[in-house]
Image: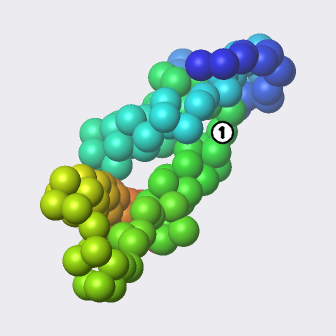
Amino acid sequence: MKRSSKRTDRVKYVDPVTGLTEYRYVEKVTYRYEDEEKVPIVIEFLAGETSAEKMVDKYHICSVQTLYAWVGRYVSQERLLSLQNQNHEEMANRSKDDQIRELKAALKQAQKEAELEKLRTKAYDKMIDLAEERFR
């Protein structure tokens, strides 16, 4: 977490005894996260054990929309690391050590892409579940 900021939010409160609704103003602290800090939060959310609202409260994220933006960013096609397309002649001209190094890097990148695709699938499943829940 790099920085935190404070703001005042209007929050709906329902009295459990009387059932009356009122709005209260509360001070809320939010944090700005680095990219590498956002990914585990997105993964935890996509695991489906916690609601978006609880995640926002737990990690002091400014809004549910911000959390969904992170999900979209980290499972979108644009953020996926693409494999570099190299032709066979270029590979043949390199030393065996260079070829092995490049192949290991390509394998690591492919594993990362596979993991991101799993995240994308979980994100879509979660979005579908939320939409079905909301529109029932």
Relative side of 55 to 63, left or right: left
Locate residue 77, reporting x and y percent: 48, 71
Q: Which image quadrant for residue 64?
A: top right
Q: Secondary structure at mark 1?
A: loop
Is residue 118 visible in the rendered image? The answer is: no
Q: Residue at x 72, y 16 (%)?
A: 4
Relative side of 133 to 17, left or right: left
Locate residue 90, reporting x and y percent: 33, 78
Which one is nearer the viewer's eye here, 50 or 104?
Answer: 104
Relative side of 109 to 100, left or right: right
Seen in the picture, residue 99 relative to 37 is either above or below; the reply is below
Which one is nearer the viewer's eye here, 126 or 105?
Answer: 105
Seen in the picture, residue 119 relative to 40 is either above or below; the reply is below
Q: Residue at x 49, y 34 (%)?
A: 36
Q: Residues within 10 Å of mark 1 (few under 14, many from 20)?
A: some
Seen in the picture, residue 103 relative to 77 is either above or below; the reply is above
Q: Quadrant where the C terminus lies?
A: bottom left
Q: Quadrant where the N terminus lies?
A: top right
Locate residue 48, reporting x and y percent: 30, 46
Q: Which residue is mark 1?
A: 63
Locate residue 103, reporting x and y percent: 21, 62
